[in-house]
Image (cartoon, rainbow, N blue to C red):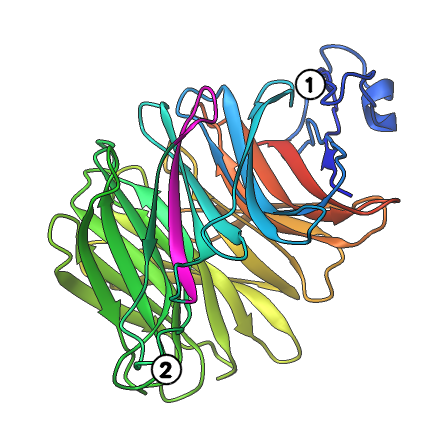
Amino acid sequence: MRWYLLVAAVTVTAATLTGSAPVRSASARAAAPGLRATAGTQLWVARFRANDLSLSDAMAVSPDGSRVFVTGESRGSRRTGAAQTVAYSAATGRLLWASRYRGAGNGSAPAAVAVSPGGRKVFVTGVASGWGTGPDYATVAYNAATGRQLWARHYHGPGIGTGNDADSASAMAVSPGGAMVFVTGTSTGRRTGQSDYATVAYTAATGRRLWVRRYNGPANGLDGATAVAVSPAGATVFVTGTSDGRTPGQYATIAYGAATGRQLWVSRYNGPGNGFDGASAAAVSPGGATVFVTGYSGGRSTNDYATVAYRAGTGTQLWVSRYHGYEAESAAVSPDRATVYVTGYNGLGGDYATVAYRAATGRQLWVSRYHGPANNGGACCVAVSPAGRTVFVTGWSQGRTGYAYATVAYRS
């Protein structure tokens, strides 16, 4: 079963996605109209049921703040996966459209979604079966207003000659001018047979490939990119992920020139416990001076959020902040550059945990947690409205009758 969960609080009304009456939480019913909300107050969450199983993987907000796009894997009656992308009204949660992409072989699974600066196109990337090449990067462009597919492109890496080596895209970003789309992920290398970072640049209008850059870490071991971000001026692309070094698993963040793919710098982070450190997300400050990387880092007894701030021009580390007992999956920066939001879940998959930090220093400002109906779920993505007043978090949540997309809005 698939569900989309919407809960309204304070003065926001939950809109139905199925044609039936909206379901409101007890907190929403009790809230008086016009009640002033405090920081971290939940605004809405909604669930939508269909006749297959779907789990959300990524979310993006349109530049004008009017729409929220969520993508994830959806399995139909034949149990083959497809990329299911849906558009919501950001104000009410009303479903606007839904589109599916299956790929050439046995289906596809998306990992990321991004919106063009003008708001006219939506791009989704992930993994899909290729034409005799095994798993490939699969990147699809849609009309943002209607969900109509505009183009689809696959990328298969060099591998080691088997013809079926794995390539899986995990993240994407669009240049500020809207002309280029950048996709990154994990791709089997030719010489080592181990996974490398592989970053691909496309033209946004047609999907024409512009360049490909690969990164093999110092240990010649396992390297996998998980996130990509672009500087506000569009000149630099930042890629982060996990790379083997002197200890297995470290953050490795790379800066590339956007036009040519030339490597500018590489910075690595190894946590204090010398455990496995996996970067999950990267975000650039609106002014372009700072890059924020977050993920999970081995602590004394469990994984922690580990959020690292770097100087964008040089890769110099500015600060590190840790949040105990959870694994971070996504980060976003407020439009006024003052706040960094990080979301994720505890290691046992119990609930969402969203943390706000002071961008300049890494000082924690607030933490807000969300428990689903079955107290089992995990957040994957966070985004901020253009005005900076609302923070959106999405992920998966187990309900009373199955799993769900669960999307939550907070007052920032």
Q: Position of residue 17 (x, y in %)?
A: 71, 22
Which label's residue is closer to the chain start, 2 or 1?
1
In the displayed structure, would residue 134 be above or below residue 235?
below
Tell me if 24 is positioned left or right of 258 in this view.
right
For disc 1, the neighbor class at 10 Å (few under 14, some 14 to 19, many from 20) is: few
Q: Position of residue 43 (x, y in %)?
A: 68, 26
Separation of marks 2 and 1 at Cα, in angstroms: 54 Å
Please, what is the dominant secondary structure of the magenta stretch? Answer: strand
**Along the line of sight, which residue is nearer the eye, 29 or 215?**
215
Region rendered in magenta: 134-149
* Residue 258 falls within the magenta-colored stretch: no
* Residue 145 falls within the magenta-colored stretch: yes
Query: Which residue carries the number 1 mark?
Result: 36
Quarter-of-image position of residue 387 = top left
Q: Residue at x 69, y 51 (%)?
A: 78
**Along the line of sight, which residue is nearer the eye, 133 or 278?**
133
Q: Residue at x 17, y 55 (%)?
A: 211
The amino acid marked with disc number 2 is Gln
